[in-house]
C-alpha cells in the first residue's frame, strides 16, 4: 500500500459482517492497484471487527460509535491520503475494472469535481443496469445536466470518484441524512464543479431485507428536504430545472408520502402531505380525489362516532 495512493476507497459499514468479505475482496482484486482501502466500522455489534482483523495491513480500519453512514464516510475521507475518493457500500461488489475505469476517465477529464458511472444488480431485476442503456449512452455523449440529476436519482456513490478537495470544500456529506445523502451531494457538487459521466458498469448493487432504502417514510421526506435545500441554497436551480418540473416532483413525493402514512394509520401526517401535493398542483385530479377520499373517511367516522355516543 503506497503512502500516497492515487485513490482512497472508503467503505462505511454497520453490522454487515455477512456481506463485508465479498465487498472487500472485490475491491482488493482490482486491475488498478494504486489505492488504499479505508474501512470505518460505524459501531457494529456483529462480527465485523473479527472480519476486518483477518485482512491485516491490507486495510486501514477505524471504529466509531454509531453515527450513521454519512458521518462514517466523512470520517473516512478525513483519513484519506489520496487526491481522489471512491466509495463502496459494505454489501455491494466492485467490478474488477471499477477503479481502472474511473481513474482513467478522471485523467482524461482532470478538471472534474466528480465522475460517476453505471451499476448493475446482483439479483435478477427487470433492468440489467441501474441507469438504462439508452440514457447511459446519452449522458456520456451529451453531458450531465441538473435536470438529469433531478428527474431520476441516477448518482450512486458506489459508482463515483470525487476530488477530495472538492468534497472537503463542500463540507462533505450532510450527516443529518440517512438515505438521500448521495442525491444531496450530487446536487452540491454539480452546482460548484464540472461533473462527467462514464458509460460503464463499475459495481453491482445488492438488495436485501436490511437495506435502509426500503424505509419509505425516510426516503420520501429526505428527498423532499434535499430538493428544498437545493432550491434554498441555489435559487437559480429552479430555472435550470423548470418550475413545472420542480412542482411536479415535489407534489408527487407528497402524494406518495400521504399514501404511505395513511397505510400506517398516520392520519394527521397523511392529511398534511396531501395538502402540500394539492397546493403545488391544484389542478391535478388524482391528488384532489385522494384528498376528498380522506375527507369522506373522516366524515364517515364522525357520523359513526356520534351514533355510538
Image (tube, grey):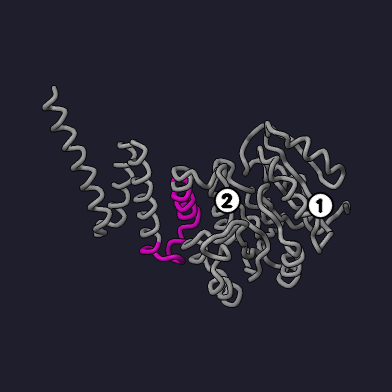
Q: Which residues are magenta?
A: 221-245
Q: Which mark is residue 200?
A: none
Along the line of sight, which residue is nearer the eye, 19 or 144? 19
Judged from the image, the secondary structure of the residue bearing numbered disc 1 is strand
Considering only vertical position in the picture, is 32 above or below 164?
A: below
Q: Residues within 10 Å of mark 2 (few under 14, many from 20)?
A: some
Residue 161: image x %, image y %?
69, 59
Q: Where the C terminus falls, by quadrant? A: top left
Residue 191, can we see it? no
| Residue 253 percent across, percent down from the top left | 39, 52
Q: Locate residue 306, reporting x and y percent.
A: 12, 27
Residue drawn at x 79%, y 60% as measured from the top left: 30
The structure residue drawn at horizontal position 23% and vertical position 53%, both measured from the top left corner, is 288
Q: Can the viewer see residue 113 in this picture?
A: yes
- Please report whichever mark, 2 or 1, sits nearer to the chain's N-terminal start: 1
Number of the label disc, if any, that sits on residue 36: 1
Q: Nearer the viewer, residue 59 or 273?
A: 59
Nearer mark to the viewer, of 2 and 1:
2
The residue identified by callout 2 is 207
Task: Name the quadrant containing residue 54.
Answer: top right
Kindly report the secondary structure that dominates the magenta region of the rendered protein: helix
| Real-space Cα separation, disc 2 to disc 1, in angstroms | 26 Å
User: Residue 15: within the magenta?
Assistant: no
Q: Residue at x 78, y 35 (%)?
A: 50
Q: Residue furthest top?
A: 309
User: With 156 as the anchor, is 303 left or right in this view?
Assistant: left
Q: In which image quadrant can residue 186 be found? A: bottom right
Is label 2 in a helix, a strand or a loop? loop
- Where residue 116 appears, as percent x and y from the top left, is 64, 63
Amino acid at each position: 500500500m503506497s503512502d500516497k495512493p492515487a485513490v482512497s476507497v472508503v467503505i462505511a459499514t454497520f453490522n454487515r459482517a455477512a456481506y463485508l468479505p465479498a465487498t472487500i475482496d472485490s475491491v482488493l482484486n482490482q486491475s488498478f492497484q494504486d489505492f488504499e482501502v479505508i474501512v470505518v466500522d460505524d459501531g457494529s455489534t456483529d462480527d465485523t471487527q473479527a472480519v476486518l482483523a483477518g485482512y491485516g495491513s491490507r486495510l486501514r480500519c477505524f471504529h466509531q460509535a454509531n453515527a450513521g453512514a454519512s458521518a462514517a464516510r466523512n470520517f473516512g475521507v478525513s483519513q484519506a491520503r489520496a487526491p481522489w475518493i471512491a466509495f463502496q457500500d459494505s454489501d455491494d461488489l466492485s467490478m474488477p475494472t471499477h477503479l481502472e475505469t474511473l481513474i482513467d476517465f478522471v485523467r482524461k477529464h482532470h478538471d472534474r469535481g466528480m465522475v460517476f458511472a453505471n451499476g448493475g444488480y446482483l439479483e435478477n431485476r427487470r433492468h440489467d443496469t441501474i441507469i438504462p442503456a439508452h440514457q447511459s449512452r446519452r449522458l456520456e455523449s451529451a453531458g450531465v445536466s441538473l435536470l438529469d440529476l433531478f428527474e431520476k436519482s441516477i448518482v450512486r456513490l458506489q459508482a463515483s470518484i470525487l476530488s477530495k478537495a472538492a468534497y472537503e470544500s463542500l463540507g462533505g456529506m450532510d450527516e443529518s441524512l440517512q438515505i438521500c445523502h448521495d442525491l444531496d451531494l450530487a446536487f452540491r457538487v454539480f452546482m460548484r464543479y464540472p461533473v462527467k459521466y462514464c458509460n460503464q458498469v463499475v459495481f453491482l448493487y445488492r438488495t436485501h431485507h436490511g437495506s435502509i432504502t426500503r424505509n419509505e417514510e425516510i426516503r420520501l421526506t429526505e428527498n423532499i428536504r434535499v430538493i428544498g435545500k437545493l432550491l434554498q441554497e441555489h435559487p437559480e436551480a429552479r430555472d435550470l430545472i423548470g418550475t413545472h418540473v420542480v412542482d411536479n416532483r415535489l407534489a408527487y413525493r407528497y402524494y406518495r408520502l400521504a399514501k404511505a402514512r395513511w397505510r400506517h394509520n398516520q392520519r394527521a401526517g397523511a392529511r398534511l402531505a396531501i395538502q402540500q401535493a394539492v397546493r403545488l398542483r391544484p389542478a391535478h385530479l388524482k391528488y384532489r380525489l385522494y384528498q376528498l377520499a380522506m375527507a369522506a373517511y373522516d366524515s364517515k367516522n364522525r357520523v359513526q362516532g356520534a351514533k355510538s355516543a
